[in-house]
Image: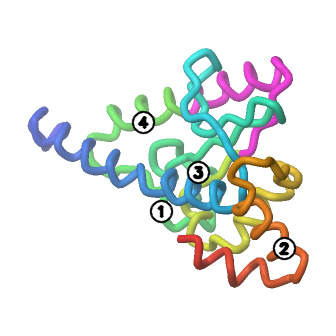
Amino acid sequence: MDKLTPRERSDNMRRIRSKGMKPELDVRRLVHGLGYRYRLHVRSLPGKPDLVFRLRRKVILVHGCFWHQHPNRRCKIVRRPKSNKTYWTRKLKNNAARDLKHLAALRKDGWRVLVIWECQTANLATLAERITTFLGSAKTSKSGASHYQVSSRRRATGRGLSDVRRVR
Ligand SMILES: [Zn+2]
């Protein structure tokens, strides 16, 4: 049974969606601060992946825990809507199915994929380590080198974690 009018529902969804942008922005800022360069939402790739590292042939997907139904019991964000069940069950199932399809297509084309869940962006230090492990070291380039050099020096001195926080 639908207790919301279509107008109210779309307002609701817009609110959830714009809130869903924050994790992606956090990840972008973090990755950029670590010295990696990427392209956003590349249309020619399955599912328009959020961050694309062409030369490394890697992508990072940032998933909102609700929209993509984070399959983790410890996730504090994901929830199953109680009202309007049929609608949501179908919608969220479709989302999950689409995610899997895109993931499979990317991997089949030789892309390596890192999925970052919204709730994992709460700890940027841990996340920074995961990202660096996934991407490998950020290459130094002549233009805009200062960023790269600073971040590799940070890593070398082992002060990386506390410094990463300041990137925010
Ligand atoms: Zn989660």
Task: Name which quarter of the figure residue 34 lies in.
Answer: bottom right
Vertical position of residue 73 compared to residue 81: above or below: below
Which residues fall within the magenta stretch? 96-114
Q: Label 1: how many residues lie within 10 Å, few (<14), some (14-19) or many (20+)?
A: few
Residue type at mark 3 is His
Residue type at mark 4 is Thr
| Disc 4 element | helix
Question: Do the CB atoms of the residues marked 3 and 1 lie less than 8 Å apart?
Answer: yes
Q: Earlier in the sequence, mark 1 or mark 2?
A: 1
Task: Name the mark on residue 77.
Answer: 1
Task: Name the mark on residue 91.
Answer: none
Residue type at mark 2 is Arg
Q: Earlier in the sequence, mark 4 or mark 3?
A: 3
Q: Label 4: how many residues lie within 10 Å, few (<14), some (14-19) or many (20+)?
A: few
Task: Name the mark on residue 89.
Answer: 4
Mark in front: 1 vs 4: 1
Question: Do the CB atoms of the residues marked 1 and 4 lie less than 8 Å apart?
Answer: no
| Disc 1 element | loop
Query: Looking at the image, which residue is at 74% across and 24% down?
Result: 106
In-image side of 58 versus 70 (left or right): right
Confirm or reject: label 1 Cβ below 8 Å from ligand 1. Answer: yes
Quick one: 103 or 6, which is closer to the camera? Answer: 103
Please name the residue that numbered disc 2 is placed on: 153
Of the 4 image quadrants, the one containing the N terminus is top left
Whole-Å distance between the Cαs marked 1 and 2?
Answer: 35 Å
Whole-Å distance between the Cαs marked 1 and 4?
Answer: 17 Å
In-image side of 41 versus 127 (left or right): left
In-image side of 58 versus 20 (left or right): right
| Image quarter for ligand 1 | bottom right
Confirm or reject: label 3 Cβ below 8 Å from ligand 1. Answer: yes
